[in-house]
Image (tube, grey):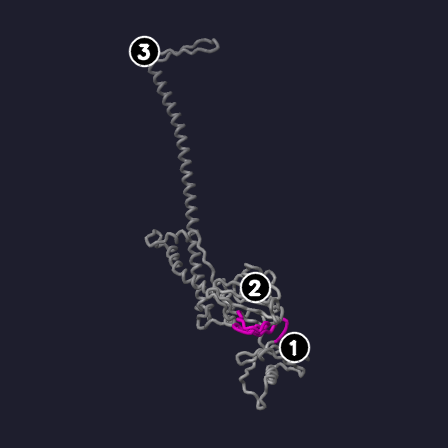
């Protein structure tokens, strides 16, 4: 007789009881089938979770790969920019050195290229933008810091460029420092005085048979240069016959005449023309007031009150003060050349001039006056050499006259 299982189904609401008879082998098959279904369902759930995780992982890896690709592209572009920047800096450095040494121009800033240093190149010296600091970005600093022959990147193009730049840098720095020293070296007349030269008269030229004097020679020179003086002309002479005023009253014109190096130079006098002369030189002299023998530490430049006073070189204003003897005075420090210039007896300061202010050669800093112990309107101009700890003769530092 076959084994038969009876399945009793009872109702919770007192309903009829149902009985089902099932053979053992069929029951076993149902149990196995149910187990297979259950295992399949659970496996399907876990597989779905696994597949979803796998897809998410692949998506994350793709995003990471894209991000890494973008990072590599950005870094590559950054290196290209760094490379271009370093190359441009080397070109700028080379161009600056060429300009200074006169390789690419007829005359260099430092007087190379077939010409010595003179007043004609003073304007070129002010082109400080030619030589400027060459900054390094983060990439070049990082590579340069670890640069060695055995480094993995030692053969890379950027590393070679940085090595070349490192070799050129001392030369560039030397030239840049030399230009800065020239910029801060006093080299011009520190007052604004002259307009365009009208003409010059050579005193060594032969005179006429009657032996004309300077007055008649001047009148003849004016005529030969197309300037007819009227009969109502007065000539006034200053100290040592080195400076004359020619006043043509009929034409209401005045001319300034300067005698120097065997020539008479004639300039028109007007609102922008302020004649000058050196009224007292550097060295021992009788003091103009006390008459006692005293060492004069500067150069007195006689000029009209209100004549603009110019900075003789680039520098920093170290003092704007009032002195018992020099009156209103300005001191300018020129660190690169280790010098200091002094401007005394000033009438007033240029607006905005103050201690610590950076000034350029030729910049107006004040106006000629008669303050302090003085016998008349003039500029006391002094040049002090800090390294030598001595006062220098300012005439040796006036190259544009």
The N terminus, quarter of image: top left
Q: Are marks 3 and 1 in contact (CB under 8 Å)?
A: no
Helix, strand or loop under label 3: loop
Between the C-alphas of marks 3 and 2, the distance is 131 Å
The local crowd at label 3, few if under 14, some if 14 to 19, many if 20 or more residues have their Cα within 10 Å, is few
* The one of 17 and 112 positioned closer to us in this rendering: 112
Q: Which residue is mark 2?
A: 330
Tell me which numbered mark, 1 or 2, is placed earlier along the sequence: 1
Q: Which residue is mark 1?
A: 253
161 relative to 270, above or below: above
**Residue 265 seen anywhere in this rendered image of the structure:** no
- Image quadrant assignment for residue 280: bottom right
Farthest-out residue, bottom? 209
Q: Position of residue 343 (x, y in %)?
A: 56, 66
Stretch in magenta: 268-297
Q: Position of residue 89 (x, y in %)?
A: 44, 59
The local crowd at label 2, few if under 14, some if 14 to 19, many if 20 or more residues have their Cα within 10 Å, is many
């Amino acid at each position: 007789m076959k084994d038969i299982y009876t399945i009793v189904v009872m109702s919770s609401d007192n309903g009829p009881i149902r009985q089902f008879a099932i053979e053992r082998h069929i029951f076993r098959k149902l149990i196995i089938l149910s187990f297979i279904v259950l295992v399949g369902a659970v496996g399907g759930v876990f597989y779905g979770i696994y597949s979803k995780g796998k897809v998410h992982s692949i998506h994350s890896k793709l995003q990471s790969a894209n991000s890494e690709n973008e990072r590599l592209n950005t870094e590559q572009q950054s290196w290209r920019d760094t490379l271009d920047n370093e190359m441009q800096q080397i070109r700028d450095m080379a161009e600056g050195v060429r300009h200074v040494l006169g390789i690419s121009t007829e005359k260099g800033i430092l007087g190379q290229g077939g010409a010595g240093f003179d007043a004609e190149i003073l304007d070129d010296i002010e082109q400080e933008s030619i030589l400027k600091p060459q900054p390094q970005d983060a990439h070049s600093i990082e590579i340069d810091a670890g640069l060695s022959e055995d480094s993995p990147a030692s053969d890379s193009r950027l590393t070679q460029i940085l090595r070349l730049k490192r070799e050129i840098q001392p030369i560039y720095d030397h030239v840049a420092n030399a230009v800065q020293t020239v910029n801060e070296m006093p080299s011009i007349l520190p007052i604004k005085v002259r307009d365009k030269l009208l003409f010059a008269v050579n005193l060594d030229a032969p005179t006429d048979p009657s032996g004309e004097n300077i007055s008649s020679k001047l009148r003849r020179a004016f005529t030969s240069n197309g300037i007819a003086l009227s009969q109502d002309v007065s000539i006034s002479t200053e100290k040592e016959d080195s400076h004359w005023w020619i006043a043509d009253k009929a034409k209401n014109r005045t001319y300034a005449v300067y005698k120097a190096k065997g020539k008479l130079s004639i300039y028109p006098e007007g609102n922008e023309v302020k004649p000058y002369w050196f009224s007292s030189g550097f060295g021992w002299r009788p003091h103009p007031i006390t008459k006692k023998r005293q060492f004069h530490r500067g150069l007195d430049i006689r000029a009209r009150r209100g004549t603009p006073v110019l900075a003789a070189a680039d520098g920093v204003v170290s003092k704007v003060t009032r002195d018992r003897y020099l009156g209103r005075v300005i001191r300018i420090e020129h660190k690169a050349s280790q010098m200091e210039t002094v401007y005394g007896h000033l009438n007033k300061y240029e607006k905005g001039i103050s201690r610590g202010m950076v000034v350029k050669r030729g910049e107006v800093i004040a106006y000629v006056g008669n303050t302090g112990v003085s016998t008349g309107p003039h500029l006391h101009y002094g040049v002090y050499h800090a390294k030598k700890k001595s006062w220098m003769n300012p005439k040796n530092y006036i190259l544009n006259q």
